[in-house]
Image (cartoon, rainbow, N blue to C red):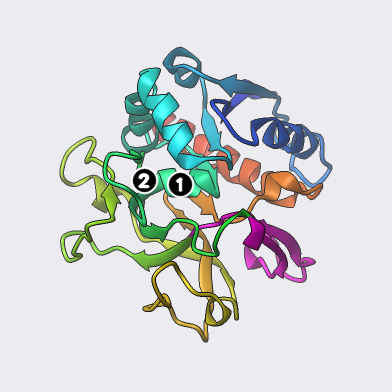
Amino acid sequence: MTTAPLTIGVLALQGAFQEHLHLLRLASSSSSLPQDPPTSYHFLEVRNADELAGCDALIIPGGESTTISLVAARSGLLGALREFVKVHRKPTWGTCAGLILLAEEANRTKKGGQELVGGLDVRVNRNFFGRQAESFERRLRLEFLGEGAEEFWGIFIRAPVVEEILVRGSEEVGEDTVVAPVVGGAGEGRERGAVEVMARLPGRSTALVAEGGPLVGLDEEVGDIVAVRQGNVFGTSFHPELTKDARIHIWWLKQVRDVLRRKREALSG
């Protein structure tokens, strides 16, 4: 029995959306992606609320988070994105700029310069590793890809890190911190469950200095958090879409299928 096609959207306002679409197509045809039951996929560039409404899942690509946020706000898409992620709780993955947008709080942000979608109870530090010239690549051990999996080539371009996992109601907000609005009631955070740390980058923060002085408060021994998951939302600091390696896209499509299967079973039960 073949299930209905899954529509996977990629936000196409700015950034590396074409690269994500390319790897999604590779992932969907990979023998590593289970086909029981057989599943077909429809991949869609998303630029407005109507296109978003037709999606079962969404990727927010790397790019300029401020630009993506401003274009989304001006096109009336920002509110629809918040509903998609935080009310309907559909599977959503953000890479680099996408991770910033999906965070509930973002540091080193000018007031009025950027709005957030939210969905991940984390505070990110934007451009933590410096400017474009300080971009770098590093091999990452990603245990969620399976035991014995080869390391993944992580590309970090003006990348953020997760500097804190938030506990609702207990954190103070700094002057340069932007906070995502509450959508769907004051209990929205509790419905998402706990934040899982999916990957760390060891040994990097010790050699880097932020504007105005050294960054503090990050555990230099265990490494900087560069991938997290909470409920339906997944975020990575690095750019899998800029590699030729589709393994994370394969893994994510599996997660999307599992989430939608459980929803169908719950509705039919």
Circle 2 packing at 10 Å, graded few (<14), some (14-19), many (20+), is many
Q: What residue sits 74% from the left and 51% below the top?
A: 247
Callouts 2 and 1 close, C-beta under 8 Å: yes
Coordinates of residue 16 in the picture (x, y in percent) = 65, 36
Q: Which residue, as the protein is rendered here, is positioned at the far top?
A: 50
Start and end of the magenta stretch?
A: 133-160
The quadrant the N terminus occupies is: top right
Q: What residue sits 36% from the left and 61% below the top?
A: 194
Q: Which mark is residue 203?
A: none
Coordinates of residue 147 in the picture (x, y in percent) = 72, 69
Q: Which mark is residue 233?
A: 1
The quadrant where residue 116 appears: top left
Q: Is residue 144 magenta?
A: yes
Q: Which residue, as the protein is rendered here, is positioned at the far bottom?
A: 221
Circle 1 packing at 10 Å, graded few (<14), some (14-19), many (20+), is many
Disc 2 to disc 1, how far (Cα)?
Answer: 7 Å
Residue linked to disc 2: 119
Q: Which residue, as the protein is rendered here, is positioned at the far front?
A: 212
